Amino acid sequence: MYDNADLELKIQMRKKAIELLGRRPKLVVDAYSGTGVIAKLFWAVNADKVICIEKDKTQAALNKMDNLIIGDNGDCIDLTIDADIVDCDAYGLVMPYIRKLTSNTVVVFTDGTPEKARKNYSAWREFKNDFNE
């Protein structure tokens, strides 16, 4: 699977997050920003401000968002305090990061662990169906 292979579903998930929030987000923290595809395609036009965090320097070099922090998102956890939405689209386990969040924000996340995805395939299919209603 490649980056943003399921882009349509990812966009739908983020639209649902805004619906849950009930208003246009003032601040979104894209905690696993990568090259910034989701930030540029979706958050830049649907939020007042977006902060992107990416620790992989190769990925970050391709990220053209204005508010980009190159580093570990765990070291930037204080940025989430004022965030309306925290976007966590990781290749690996994202729950350790989510557990660190102290603010009362809407969290959009995917868990990119391949073994976990295989074990939970039926749950994932159910989850996808919920967003395709």
Image: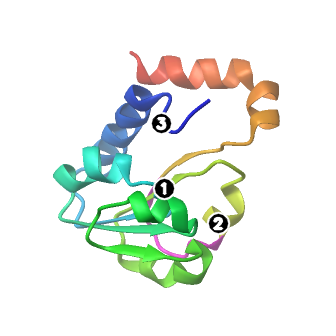
Q: Residue type at mark 3? A: Asn
* Residue occupying image coordinates x 29% and y 64%: 65
Q: Nearer the viewer, mark 3 or mark 2?
A: 3
Disc 3 or 2, which lies upstream in sequence?
Answer: 3
| Residue 75 in view here | yes
* Residue occupying image coordinates x 21% and y 58%: 47
Q: Main secondary structure of the magenta part?
A: loop
- In this rendering, position of residue 118 left or right of residue 63: right
Residue 21 magenta-highlighted: no
Mark 3 near mark 2, Cβ–Cβ under 8 Å? no
Q: Nearer the viewer, residue 41 or 122?
A: 41
What is the crowding at mark 3: few (fewer than 14 residues within 10 Å), some, or many (at least 20)?
few
Q: What is the C-alpha distance between the residues marked 3 and 1?
A: 10 Å
Q: Name the mark on residue 4.
A: 3
For label 1, the residue is 34
What is the crowding at mark 2: few (fewer than 14 residues within 10 Å), some, or many (at least 20)?
few
- For label 1, the SS is loop
For label 2, the residue is 97
* Residue occupying image coordinates x 52% and y 39%: 3
- Where residue 74 appears, as percent x and y from the top left, is 61, 76
- Where residue 52 appears, as percent x and y from the top left, is 39, 66
Eyeballing the image, is 31 above or below 20? below
- Where residue 27 appears, as percent x and y from the top left, is 28, 68
Mark 1 near mark 2, Cβ–Cβ under 8 Å? no
Q: Nearer the viewer, residue 62 or 112?
A: 62
**Range covered by the magenta-colored residues:** 100-107
Q: Residue type at mark 2? A: Tyr
- In this rendering, position of residue 70 left or right of residue 8: right
Disc 3 or 1, which lies upstream in sequence?
Answer: 3
- For label 2, the SS is helix
- Where residue 63 appears, as percent x and y from the top left, is 37, 60
| Residue 30 in view here | no
